[in-house]
Amino acid sequence: PSALREIEVEVPTVRWTDIGGLEEVKQQLREAVEWPLKYPDSFRRLGIDPPKGILLYGPPGTGKTLLAKAVATESEANFVSIKGPEVFSKWVGESERAVRELFRKARQVAPSIIFIDEIDALAPMRGLVSTDSGVTERVVSQLLTEIDGLERLEGVVVIAATNRPDIIDPALLRPGRFDRLIYVPPPDEKARLEILKVHTRNMPLAEDVDLLEIAKKTEGYTGADIEVLVREAGLLALRENINIDKVYARHFEEALKKVKPSLTQDIIK
Ligand code: ATP
């Protein structure tokens, strides 16, 4: 299979309003990505260099992919993405070509956002018995070449995501590369309430459902966990009565027992 065919351009539909909480992160992405893509001339006029690369880091399931897609939608940009581990598994023997292809595609469809999820998979496997015969190094080096070759304000911005910023190759974090680091935190109570509102938008809730109460009870739950929780409550309601027309507090109570938080105390604090 050729890398050429497998890298697809996506027109995402995620909006800022589909993301609960994370207001500061959204604002940072607006200024660092949306404005330069939409108003490059204003940045040139004032001599401001926007970032070429942005690294979103934080625990799994907190909305990093969602944020990258939303900033693409809101910037009216195309979205070209790849997952770190895929670079090695899907394009065996042509991993570097996949990286080249990714950037070529992105330029072709600019304004565009390149999203590299799980970029830590491209971390050098120091100290490990290396089974990869230098392919990781060659891929990182190709990635550096491509990022260095991007002109600021040419309409391509690279966003990467990781839960392991500590193992990222430091060469990727130098100025002119991923030089903007943005932490995507686990949701606090207020953010959990917002996420609950997003995911129950199309769900008829009985009067006894108190979302604030659920937000209080879901410390340690990520956005992804909350999505699962809401779906579970809905399914429990249907299981009780397939003709039921609302989801009740008891279904959420039951769902809370089944769906457990994925974050531990040390990550939250
Ligand atoms: P990973 O590190 O596992 O890739 P991630 O941080 O990229 O995780 P997403 O893939 O963006 O997380 O989130 C997974 C799902 O969880 C989303 O599709 C969404 O339904 C839900 N979700 C996560 N965070 C939020 C949020 N802040 N608001 C609404 N939904 C969220």
Image (cartoon, grey):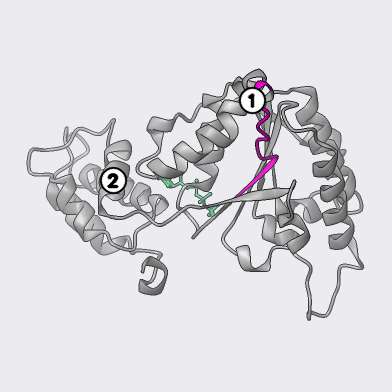
How far from the left and from the top, in percent, is residue 81?
68, 39
Residue drawn at x 87%, y 38% is 2
Could you say whether the residue bearing mark 1 is in a helix, strand or loop? loop
In front of the other: 250 or 50:
50
Residue drawn at x 84%, y 61% is 136
Q: Does the magenta run of residues contain 33?
A: no
If the image is split into quadrants, where does the C terminus sit? bottom left
Q: Magenta residues: mostly which secondary structure? A: loop
- Image mark for residue 235: 2
* Disc 1 target residue: 46
Residue drawn at x 25%, y 46% is 193
Q: Are marks 2 and 1 in contact (CB under 8 Å)?
A: no
Q: How many marks?
A: 2
Amino acid type assigned to the residue bearing label 1 in the image? Leu
Q: Inspect this view and state whether residue 82 appears.
A: yes
In front of the other: 66 or 184:
184
Q: Inspect this view and state whether residue 12 appears.
A: no
Residue 54: name its quadrant.
top right
- Image mark for residue 36: none
* 173 is higher (above) or lower (below) than 248: below
Could you say whether the residue bearing mark 2 is in a helix, strand or loop? helix
Image-based side of 58 in relation to 213, left or right: right
How far from the left and from the top, in percent, is residue 52?
70, 39
Image-based side of 25 in relation to 132, left or right: left
Q: Does the magenta run of residues contain 47?
A: yes
Mark 2 vs mark 1, CA separation in Å: 54 Å
- What segment carries the magenta color? 45-55
Q: Callout 2: 10 Å neighbours few (<14), some, many (20+)?
A: some
